[in-house]
Image (cartoon, rainbow, N blue to C red):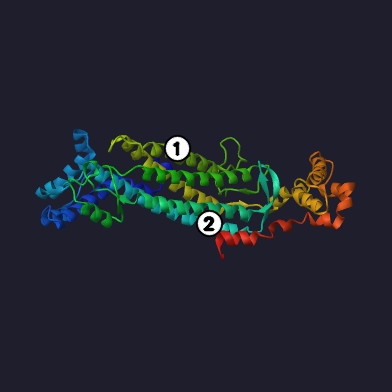
Amino acid sequence: MIPRYTRPQLAEIWSPESKFGIWLEIESHACDALAELGVIPAEAAKAVRERGGFDVARIDEIEAEVKHDVIAFLTSLAEHVGDEARYVHQGLTSSDVLDTCFNVQLVRAADLLLEDLDKLLAALKTRALEHKLTPCIGRSHGIHAEPTTFGLKLAQAYAEFERAQTRLEAARAEVAICAISGPVGTFATIDPRVEAHVANAMGLRPEPISTQVVPRDRHAMYFATLGVIASSVERLATEIRHLQRTEVLEAEEYFSKGQKGSSAMPHKRNPVLSENLTGLARMVRAYVTPALENVALWHERDISHSSAERMIGPDATATLDFALARLTGVVEKLVVYPEKMRANLDLLGGLVHSQRVLLALTQAGFSREDAYQAVQRNAMKVWAGDGAFLDLLKADKDVAKALSADTLEACFDLEHHFAHVDTIFARVFGDA
């Protein structure tokens, strides 16, 4: 995790103190279950509960010698518990602790990411309603297409992130799994009831069948979901970057007092936050591939996944958390220029209404091919700078013969394009 792109709450989830604290919870709950089953003395479970502790520096010191993090932790734990520590980790294997802990951390990270999405959705909804009927040009291939509204652009983003929220909830459930099944997952050394007890105590579900490790297809789905959400972040960030271009300037990031845009050019106001979000999205997606490759472990287990997960777990979740929070701020403070949107909408002299004229001609008896040809030949004159589209159509003998001036002018009515905005908003936001 890079501090520049990591927020404190997310960093805490992946801190050594948090990790070892979860390990202690797992071992303590396991001891409670073993005591209830009569496998270990009740006094031992009580001792772990009451005196269980660890020292991070001491764990690091022990691991430097033994080269095994779980053994180092258990040794430090024993130094706090005393003689009863011999009953700790009875029948468990390292993966039981490591995998269950990793899943707890992923669940907690998902909870924070879901909170991030709630805030982003609220910001998008507010701005979408604000600009529900703010006219702007829709673009396909980067070229003017037909009129839309800025509110519809934001409503689309809302719907996309609402889908992201649903996917993340499913991904959270996918990894909310506990595995306490012993070596190669057969429960030969540990009663399945211990797993059930630990899972219940930690808000998880038992893995139906583990092979000493939790199957990594679960984690692949989790990280793939983060990657898709990152792509949605980039989609909206890219839209903002394009809208802020000098030649467009329909919207721009808030530029605070005292902010500087360039070390060389004092006039600059750059979309630096949206550009930053684009880069962060690339990184989150980059973590998906290792998660997919971790699925194919050897036989019942190996640790080829371990080193990758130690990096991608903290980095992917922290980076996405930061990106979602930053995007929310961009949306909340986005400066919108309705006048420039309208100016750009009118930039091509009415060409954006070409389809309505085409359809009107077909209704008047033209074949679609002839109608298209008639509209296009006049449109090309507009591109060449030979006049306004409506004037050229009125002067075209074939068009004028089929359509009256009033009918042509009606084809240029901007409000026609917004007749169903309320319907779309109701689909996206319900009764809002």
The quarter of the rendered structure image containing the N terminus is top left
Residue assigned mark 1: 286
Instruction: Determine the secondary structure under disc 2.
Output: helix
Identify the residue at image location x=30%, y=34%. 298
The one of 33 and 125 positioned closer to us in this rendering: 33
Res 58 visible: no
Residue at image coords 23%, 51%: 26
Q: Residue furthest bottom?
A: 431
Instruction: Tell me the quarter of the image containing the C terminus.
Output: bottom right
Question: Which of 239 and 193 lies nearest the eye of the viewer?
Answer: 193
Check disc 2: other Cα within 10 Å, few if <14, some if 14-19, many if 20+: many
Q: Which residue is mark 2?
A: 123
Task: Pinpoint residue 189: horizontal percent, then vertical percent.
Answer: 17, 46
Residue for point 21% across, 54% down = 193
Q: Secondary structure at mark 1?
A: helix
Instruction: Tell me the kind of residue under disc 1.
Output: Ala
